[in-house]
Image (cartoon, grey):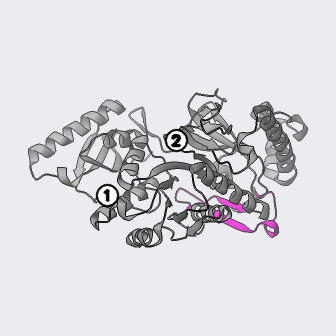
């Protein structure tokens, strides 16, 4: 098994020594250089010298996305903009964008982390990686780009969109690795089918997919339709971008680069740290970043941790594939619902496509959930009785999973909008 560096299989004792030393340095840095954190720690009566061991981390305050927005644009930076060489930002669709800044050392760290995760995913310098993540303020495109170049992999920086051209270049250049969102990978497969391009016409062998939650059933669909191994990559711009965690070939959890990004799992309601194996919200602390160091950042992603050594030999802690987010969660008539639950139901039915839309409304003071479901072409019939029967089966399967009543609307193939970025799954019309 290839490793990118020695830190991937450190002994538990050696790794704790590294993490503890980096944590102590981090707390001193943010106390001295970030007024936001100095005020927070002073309010709690905490001084940097009070943080000596990893267990002391629980004394420190959480950081949230709202904190970044409240300090927009540069209020949480630990360096002046003279020492920041790159800025990235979220789209800001739910408020002010979150802005992240990188020093020279941060860019080098990011590049190293992505190269490490690519090796973990099975990529080598002999591969050609087609990067279909967006370039620009979004961290996906440039993050993959620098890491792949560092590894020596040939980069095809096509960015998102231009789907037919993507497929043409896959054929012409012999792309072996595809990096994009899982929903876009499925869309590529759809268009390939339309234009009669077969997997035998391509050289693809690995897909490195992330930026949105996706289920095991969706993985099976992607692997079947594109004839690739679909690897889950996890990252978020606030922490560094892609390169935080990735699956290895065994696909039994994502290896977190925990020598740089220390993970905890908390109860999202109480904030209490949960033991390994229990599902909760992932919290990450950036142990080595200079530009935007973060203490206990609440990711809102739901997962669990596993510290057992993987079959690949790595001792990096593993996280389970994220099943949803606390802020993607819908509360409908008192029931907590995640879009991924409905996706799992649809992907188990051969008549449906993995494209759906959840429309939530409030009618006569009662929450109503309508699920738009795309039907696979061979099963879309003019026979009303057949469609009614299929609709009833879908409705029954969804209701059995969710425990609440839903409305189901069957729509023709390609009715629901496709996107090369994160798929839009929910329209919530309720006013609170």
Residue lying furthest right:
49
Q: Is residue 291 left or right of residue 136?
A: right
Residue 90 belongs to the span the image colors magenta: yes
Sequence-first tag of 1 and 2:
2
Residue 44 visible at all: yes
Q: Which residue is mark 2?
A: 251
Residue at x 27% of width, y 41% of height: 349
- The magenta span reads 77-101
Image quadrant in which you'd find residue 299: top right
Local packing at callout 1 (Cα closer than 10 Å; few below 14, some 14-19, many 20+) is some
Q: Residue at x 78, y 65 (%)?
A: 104
Side (left or right) of 275 relative to 185: right
Residue 192's place in the image compared with 281, above or below, is: below
Residue visible at 31% across and 30% down? Answer: 400
The quadrant where residue 368 appears: top left
Quadrant containing the N terminus is: top right
> What residue would you read off at disc 1?
416
- Magenta stretch secondary structure, dominant: loop
How far apart marks 1 and 2 lie (CA) works out to: 30 Å
């Amino acid at each position: 098994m290839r490793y990118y560096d020695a830190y991937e299989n450190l002994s538990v004792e050696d790794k704790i020594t590294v993490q503890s030393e980096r944590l102590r340095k981090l707390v001193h840095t943010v106390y001295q250089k970030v007024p936001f954190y100095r005020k927070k720690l002073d309010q709690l009566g905490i001084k940097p010298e009070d943080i000596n061991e990893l267990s002391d981390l629980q004394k420190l305050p959480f950081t949230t996305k709202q904190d970044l927005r409240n300090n927009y644009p540069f209020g949480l930076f630990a360096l002046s903009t003279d020492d920041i060489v790159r800025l990235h930002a979220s789209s800001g669709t739910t408020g002010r964008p979150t802005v992240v800044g990188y020093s020279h050392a941060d860019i080098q760290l990011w590049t190293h982390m992505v190269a490490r995760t690519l090796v973990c995913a099975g990529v080598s310098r002999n591969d050609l990686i087609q990067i279909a993540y967006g370039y620009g303020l979004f961290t996906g495109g440039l993050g993959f780009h620098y890491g792949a170049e560092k590894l020596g992999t040939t980069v095809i920086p096509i960015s998102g969109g231009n789907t037919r051209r993507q497929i043409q270049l896959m054929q012409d250049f012999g792309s072996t690795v595809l990096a994009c969102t899982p929903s876009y990978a499925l869309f590529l497969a759809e268009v390939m089918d339309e234009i009669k391009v077969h997997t035998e016409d391509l050289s693809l062998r690995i897909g490195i997919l992330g930026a949105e939650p996706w289920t095991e059933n969706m993985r099976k669909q992607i692997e079947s339709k594109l004839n690739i191994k679909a690897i889950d990559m996890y990252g978020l711009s606030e922490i560094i971008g892609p390169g935080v965690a990735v699956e290895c070939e065994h696909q039994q959890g994502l290896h977190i680069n925990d020598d740089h990004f220390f993970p905890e799992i908390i109860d999202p309601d109480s904030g209490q740290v949960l033991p390994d194996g229990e599902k909760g919200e992932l919290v990450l602390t950036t142990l080595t970043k200079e530009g935007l160091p973060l203490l206990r950042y609440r990711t809102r992603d739901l997962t669990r941790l596993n510290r057992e050594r993987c079959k690949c030999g790595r001792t990096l802690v593993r996280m389970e594939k994220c099943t949803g987010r606390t802020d993607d969660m819908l509360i409908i008539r008192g029931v907590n619902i995640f879009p991924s639950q409905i996706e799992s139901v649809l992907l188990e039915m051969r008549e449906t496509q993995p494209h759906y839309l959840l429309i939530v409304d409030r009618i006569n003071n009662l929450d109503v959930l309508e699920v738009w479901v795309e039907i696979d072409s061979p099963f879309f019939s003019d026979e009303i009785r057949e469609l009614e029967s299929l609709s009833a089966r879908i409705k029954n399967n969804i209701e059995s999973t969710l425990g609440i009543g839903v409305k189901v609307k069957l729509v023709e193939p390609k009715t629901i909008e496709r996107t090369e970025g994160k798929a839009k799954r929910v329209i919530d019309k309720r006013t609170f």
